[in-house]
Amino acid sequence: MSTETASADATAKPTRPQRMGRLPYTRKHTRLLLGSGTGWALDAMDVGLISFVGLAIATQWDLTRTEQSWLLTIGFVGMALGATFGGMLADRYGRRTVFAATLVIYGLATGASALVTGLAMLLLLRFVVGVGLGAELPVASTLVSELSPTRIRGRLVVILESFWALGWILAALIGFFVVPASEDGWRWAFALGMVPALYAAVIRWGLPESPLFLERRGREEEAEAVVRSFEESAGVPHEESGPLPPVPPKTPGVLWSARYRKRTIGIWLVWFCVNFSYYGAFIWLPTLLYAQGFDLVRSFGYTLIITLAQLPGYAVAAVLVETWGRRPTLATFLLGSAGAAVAFGMSGEVWQIIAAGCAMSFFNLGAWGALYAITPEIYPTSVRASGAGAAAGFGRIASIIAPLSVPIVLAAWGNAALFTLFGAAFVIGAAAAYLLLPEQAGDALDAT
């Protein structure tokens, strides 16, 4: 490097993303996590509720196994569409705006589900719920990623993802205490899902928009105001920003261009495999336990215990994604998920079922945390939400296939074969993560 170049680099003005990236953790980051994380937890509560409510409705309405499969699956059809188009809308209209809109959509549809009188209307509303849920998750992780300090960016996204466990635990508590309480218990469970619609107003006005998005849309004054608010919270002086690097011409199919093709294949494979095994196992878990001879209350209780193991899984992943790296953490947790899935399928005694189920929760949800940390990082700002949404949307195809496949595999080969299949999918995902994804720990986000 020449003396002139070194001097120019030393005096260059930092960009706004660089100013955001080198800040310490502040109270504004805490508010960001709590605001985004509460919405995330409410999402998880809604997804988790259907596994409990679905069993109660199937029993009360005398649904066939195929009808129950569609009840558990139709929301994922909506999630596939929501994730794909929600990311595109977030790159066009803003992360915060789309985040709030999705909360309203799925909150109102969930509340309306409490009033249905037949399966057809319930399936329609569950589809609408899925659209809102699918759009919200990749958008929220993109927003948090773009507002986080570089050195702990992955950790904060994993912490955001850990709110999923809180929501699923809340769903398990509602399933345990509310759903079996009366014939209308499942209706009261759905009614509680209207909470996100009320919370959306707080989200819309309480969270900052991403300054990277604002600057790329030419809204520089708004971007500067966001950055300055975080600097003031950190107690650091304001700086004058330099320009962002120019955005390369956006050609059709940028995610499949030579630069991004390998990582797109990798992230799509991981999302597909994780969705297939996670939703295939956990959506059906209360029903599978019920089928093994446990009554409704005990099957819900065991599911609650297994769900609690998600929290330490997130905690360990939150540490490892920064100290060890995103890619090895993700691959290792996926391999752990594979072993736990096989063990669960071969379990017979109650203690074996609970132990293997807890291990599956621990590793699987830790893997989810690492996956959400790495997904927004592998694309530039101009297509970050679109790329994350496309990967999530492709993964949701597996979440459609898996619940529909469970009754077929169970009838043909049994419980051990089913969970061996889930284990194989985890192994494929681990290989894709380690071989095809870049390591982004400690790297600044690509602001182009």
Image: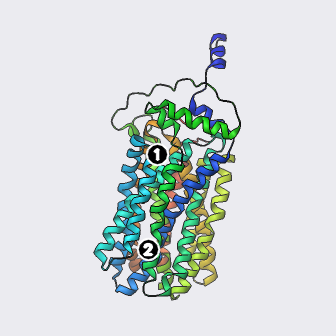
Identify the residue at horizontal 35%, vertical 38% (top origin).
253
| Front-most of residues 175 and 254 | 175
For residue 190, the mark is 2
As drawn, 49 above or below 211: below
Q: Position of residue 389 (x, y in %)?
A: 42, 49
Q: Examine the rendering and report whether any part of residue 380 can be seen.
A: no
Q: Position of residue 284 (x, y in %)?
A: 46, 74
If the image is split into quadrants, where does the N terminus sit?
A: top right
Identify the residue at horizontal 47%, vertical 43% (top origin).
263
Q: Amino acid at mark 2?
A: Phe
Identify the residue at horizontal 62%, vertical 32% (top origin).
19
Q: Amino acid at mark 1?
A: Arg
| Front-most of residues 424 and 162 | 162
Label 2 SS: helix
Label 1 SS: helix
Q: Position of residue 302 (x, y in %)?
A: 58, 80
Q: Which image quadrant for residue 312?
A: bottom right
Pointer 1 residue: 95
> How far apart are the two marked residues, 1 and 2, measured between alpha carbons?
27 Å
N-term-proximal mark, 1 vs 2: 1
- The 10 Å Cα crowd at callout 1, few under 14, some 14 to 19, many 20 or more, is many
Q: Position of residue 277 (x, y in %)?
A: 48, 65
As drawn, 185 above or below 243: below
| Front-most of residues 224 and 391 | 224
